[in-house]
Amino acid sequence: MIIGYARVSTADQNLDLQRDALIRASCARIYEEHASGAREDRPELRRALEAMRRGDQLVVWKLDRLGRSVLQLIKFVTELREAGIEFRSITDGIDTSTPTGRFMFHVLASLAEMERDLIRERTLAGLAAARARGRLGGGKLKLTTDQVRTVLQLASDRGTTIESIARSFRVHRGTIYRLLERHREELSPVGRRVNPGRKAKGS
């Protein structure tokens, strides 16, 4: 089954353009949402995912209909593929059911990985410089909003351990675990992991 998802940020914006494109893409169902791309809980997107089975395809008009962060989008599409669900973005020309589309996705994923590595290197270098100047020494450190954002970015990279993050910020690793628990919805673009073991009825 081909399932479409359309989103606009405010109630007074029009979904017609996206709806028409999804109908032309042969979507059997279309889930429509009025919500900000930064919003963690998007009920219609969650409903679309819950309706999907292995072998189905999720179609959007444009990548940014799913979210604003490239890293989150890559993670989201990767989870779909692990669950046996294909993905297509009409405007961006990405269709993971085709060789060309898979190639485009791998290019985006490589760029996102490079961006993540650069962020991690800059962050760790900055923390090391701050420690050298004595700015992070001493007792307990209360993490600022920017530091929390950095922790979440680092934690999204499987190559970075919780222990190394805790050492960088001079906090106990339990602090990092509690932080990730409070912000676990931000680590998934839709607040729900697709279940890779889910199969279609009768399969």
Image: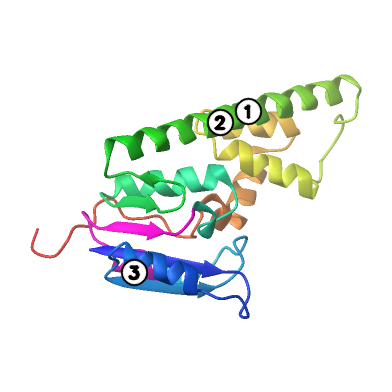
Kind of residue at disc 3: Ile
Location of residue 47 in the rendering, given as x and y in whole percent from the top left corner: 38, 71
Mark 3 — residue? 23
Spot occupied by residue 4 in the image (x, y as percentages of width and height): 36, 65
* Separation of residues labelled 3 and 2 (CA atoms): 44 Å
- The magenta segment is 46-62
Q: Mark 1 Cα within 10 Å, few/some/many (few <14, many 20+)?
A: few
Mark 3 burial class by Cα count in 10 Å: few <14, some 14-19, many 20+: some
- The residue lying at 34 percent from left, 69 percent from top is 23
Spot occupied by residue 144 in the image (x, y as percentages of width and height): 80, 47
Q: Which residue is mark 2?
A: 161
Q: Are marks 2 and 1 in contact (CB under 8 Å)?
A: yes
Q: Quadrant of the C terminus?
A: bottom left
Find out whether residue 49 is within the magenta segment: yes
In the rendered view, does 154 fall on the left or right side of 131?
Answer: left
- Residue projecting furthest to the left: 202
Task: Say what amino acid the circle numbered 2 marks.
Answer: Thr
Q: How is the image coloured?
A: rainbow
